[in-house]
Amino acid sequence: MPAHYDVLVLGAGAAGLMCAMTAARRGRRVRVLERSNKPGKKILMSGGGRCNFTNLHVAPDRFQSANPHFCKSALSRYTQWDFIELVEQHGIDYFEKETVNGLSGQLFCRESSKQIVAMLLDECGRSGVEITLDCETTKVQGTGPFRLETSEGSLRSETLVVATGGLSIPSLGGSAFGYRLAKQFGMEVLPTSAGLAPFTFSGLLKERFSRLAGVSCEVKARNGEVGFREDLLFTHRGLSGPVVLQLSSHWQPGESITLDLTPGKKLVPELLKTKQRHPRSLLRTQLNDLLPHRLVREIEDLFWSEHADQPLSDWPDRRLEALGDRLQAWRVKPSGTEGYRKAEVTLGGVNTQALSSKTMESHVPGLFLVGEVVDVTGELGGFNFQWAWSSGHAAGQAV
């Protein structure tokens, strides 16, 4: 006879482990099946190895979904403060990241993301959760009980939780398995795309950005009505950094983006004032106080190479005005993004219309879906982890 459990959880990531430990605390017999060789791989690599585990400013409007109201229930019943309390109970030291504009609300482990994984595994261990690694699930059949065929043999459970993640970063286990399973049980899967991913460019812009690889500065980036003000990083293939990752989740192929290289400043009046005060100075000399020197040299070559060595006194005001406006509204067109290979999240996924916002149970009795596999995607900065904790907890309370 197949081994029988109250709950089987597919995936030992953030949402799966949270669901498992929550259900086991309620006395449920829980087993987690993970196809990779270690639990919490995305947790381990997140935040530069320090895990941006939540955000102080979690709110429903920081998430994207075809149904923007869906996330409200889970987020309100297991909040960032609940997870912070758990972190503090385990003695994990953390800090709030500071940005140019002040504190960001992003919370990171002071030491290592390994502490978050260890905390989750400790909670699972205390509650008797079984975790099986290197376990491939090949077939799922039936309902109440579900029957699973796996590389560890046949298993049965009254409830099944799909916490398999999305398509992002396949090297860490991202796959379409959860979407295929949802379709098998009659659920709609909305179109998916790479979210929080760097932009790539081609041609002369790629060459120019490649020469600037490693240079970073604060900018405001927009496409249409959506805009973010954070750090930009030039790469060998294009643009990255927090501001680009944020904007990429709202960008459509073929769209241009607009970069303000001196956000918060009225550049044209500053340039005209500088012309009066320092008429013999060069424009690049003045811009070096505002932007990285390598970037100034590159945009000089792009925008005013024929006037590079002319003192400001030789610049007509209208030319300075036009250039100032351009530096605060530089339009560039990405050729694409780095795709799922570098994406931190997957946009789209299982349509929430098939799920209970309170329990994450689908229209199939006993079948729950949590975390990234669902069509709920947060902004950069700990929001996606909070969705994992909240949705996992909601299901764990109900299975």
Image: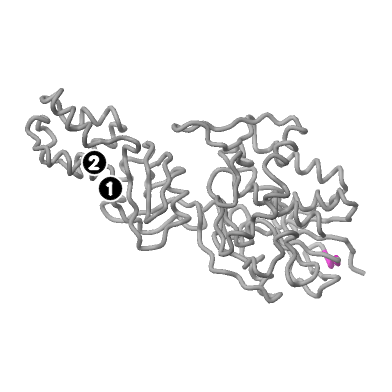
Q: Is residue 240 left or right of residue 53?
A: left
Residue that lies at the very extreme toward the top in this rendered image: 277
Foreground: 75 or 245?
75
- Per the rendering, the mark at residue 299 is 2
Is 339 on the left-hand or right-hand side of 310? Answer: right
User: Which quarter of the figure has residue 73?
Assistant: bottom right
Q: Quadrant for the C terminus, please.
A: bottom right
- Are the residues tagged 1 and 2 within 8 Å (C-beta)? yes
Q: Report which quarter residue 164 is drawn in.
A: bottom right
Check if residue 155 falls in the magenta segment: yes
**What is the x, y in percent for residue 304?**
15, 41
- Looking at numbered disc 1 in the image, what kind of residue is underneath it? Trp
Q: Which residues are magenta?
A: 153-157
Instruction: Give the camera-side residue of 369 and 216.
Output: 369
Residue for point 89% across, 67% down:
2
The residue carrying pointer 1 sits among few (fewer than 14), some (14 to 19) or many (20 or more) residues within 10 Å by Cα, namely: some
Image spot of residue 371 (x, y percent): 66, 56
**Residue 89 lies in quadrant:** top right
- In the rendered structure, find residue 330 and report the number of the disc placed on it: 1
Give residue 226's position: percent from left, percent from top: 42, 52
Q: Residue at x 31, y 51 (%)?
A: 206
Colouring method of the image? one colour
Please say if 154 is above or below 307: below
Q: Quick one: SS at disc 2?
A: helix
Circle 1 sits in a helix, a strand or a loop, which is it? strand
Which residue type carries mark 2? Ile
Marks 1, 2: nearer the viewer:
1
Q: Is-magenta flag for residue 96?
A: no
Task: Please tell me whether the stretch drawn in magenta is mainly helix, strand or loop.
Answer: strand
Residue 315 or 20: which is nearer the viewer? Answer: 315
Mark 2 residue crowding within 10 angstroms, few (<14) / some (14–19) / many (20+): some
